[in-house]
Image (cartoon, rainbow, N blue to C red):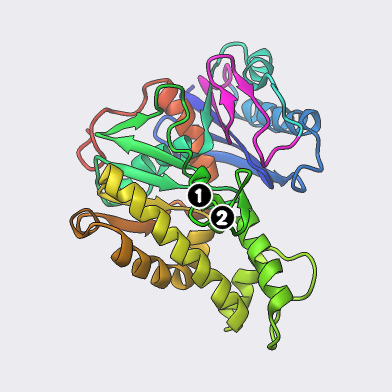
Amino acid sequence: MAETYLGIDIGGTTCAVCTADRQGRLLASASFTTGKGSLGWKETVDLLLEEAGRQAAAGGGSGPKAVGISCGSPMDREAGLIQEPANLPGWRDVPIVDLFSAAFPRAAIHLENDANAGALAEYHFGAGKNEPARNLLFLTFGTGLGAGLILNGELYRGSSNYAGEIGHIRLSPDGPLGCGKAGSFEGFCSGGGIEQLAVDRRAAWSEETCLRDGALTARDVGLGARSGDPLCLEILDISGDRLGQGLAMVIDILNPELVVIGSIFTRCEKFLRPAMERALEREARKETLACCRILPAALDEEIGLYASLSAAYHGESVFSDEPPGVRG
């Protein structure tokens, strides 16, 4: 039987399980929603293990060679613990690696930060494969905001595995809350932040709008923007401006050839990009900006699947050290 690899993507709103071969060809996948934390971690892990077992049984053989688990920070990779990320309330010191090791005793289990895993996925299977680059920055721009860094062709984690936590950067003295900070990069450039921005702007808005009073979602804003709603367009313009402001700092520091942005940016690029580009022209050095391309995630809705698989591939040294486009 050919080698198979199992991917487990644990997100704040959706979880997924997938199986692929060594070349990254998907053989099976399934997902379920978690109701933004309404499912407890035990119930969620039970569902993940059940589906993983189903896929492994369907594949026959001795089971997966390795399991990759992609999840938000904080985490302790060495101890195999998820340490209550903001989008997973109640997940305090969950021994996720031990739980999967018990279910798949023959497989190596690899836990990875979701932004790092997303960077690996886009580097090897997505935008980085289509647009070869040795230095790539990946931004999640989903429920929260984090970054994964590929520097000189290698994943960069930092001295304590917390490199890329750009959501904590404060862009304004006030504004939507993200990472516990008002006016943070995550506050302006995440699903949760856009929801807060929408509620605040709606309360002060006197003109006609499709946004109702009360609870709103980033999806509501995106749909409204597509219909030309002026308030929704303004909200995404604000988010795009702050995206450009934050990116200017990171681009000037790291000087990457390629920035890839996922999730909300992928779906709302036409509304976010104009303000983002204006802010970049205003804030970034022209020399660093000139050599940097900014693209939506090429893997689109499959990025969570490939991110989790990439955690397994990277952990098992399946990936070549060569940059995309020149691998044998």
Q: Is residue 223 above or below residue 3?
A: below
Residue 298 shows in the view: no
Query: Residue 142, position in %: x, y?
Result: 57, 51
Given contact means CB atoms under 8 Å apart, are the residues at marks 1 and 2 in contact? yes
Of callouts 1 and 2, the N-terminal one: 1
Which image quadrant for residue 92? top right
Say if the magenta span includes residue 58: no
Which residue is found at the position 65% from the left and 15% from the top?
98
Residue 260 shows in the view: yes
Which residue is found at the position 37% from the left and 38% from the top?
149
**Amino acid on which the number 2 mark rests in the picture:** Gly
| Label 2 secondary element | loop
Residue bearing the label numbered 1: 170
Which image quadrant for residue 97? top right
Indicate left or right for 65 with 293 as reference. Answer: right
Query: Residue 292, position in %: x, y?
Result: 25, 54
Please rate how many residues cluster around mark 2, counting C-alpha atoms within 10 Å: few if below 14, some from 14 to 19, many from 20: many
Q: What is the C-alpha distance between the residues marked 1 and 2? A: 6 Å
Residue range in magenta is: 61-89
**Amino acid on which the number 1 mark rests in the picture:** Arg
Indicate left or right for 226 with 169 as reference. Answer: right
Please rate how many residues cluster around mark 1, counting C-alpha atoms within 10 Å: few if below 14, some from 14 to 19, many from 20: many
| Label 1 secondary element | loop
Most foreground residue, 58 or 112:
112
Indicate left or right for 250 with 184 as reference. Answer: left
Query: Residue 234, position in %: x, y?
Result: 55, 76
Residue bearing the label numbered 2: 183
Where's the C terminus, which quadrant?
Answer: top left
Extreme residue toward the front, this view: 173
Say if the magenta span includes residue 75: yes
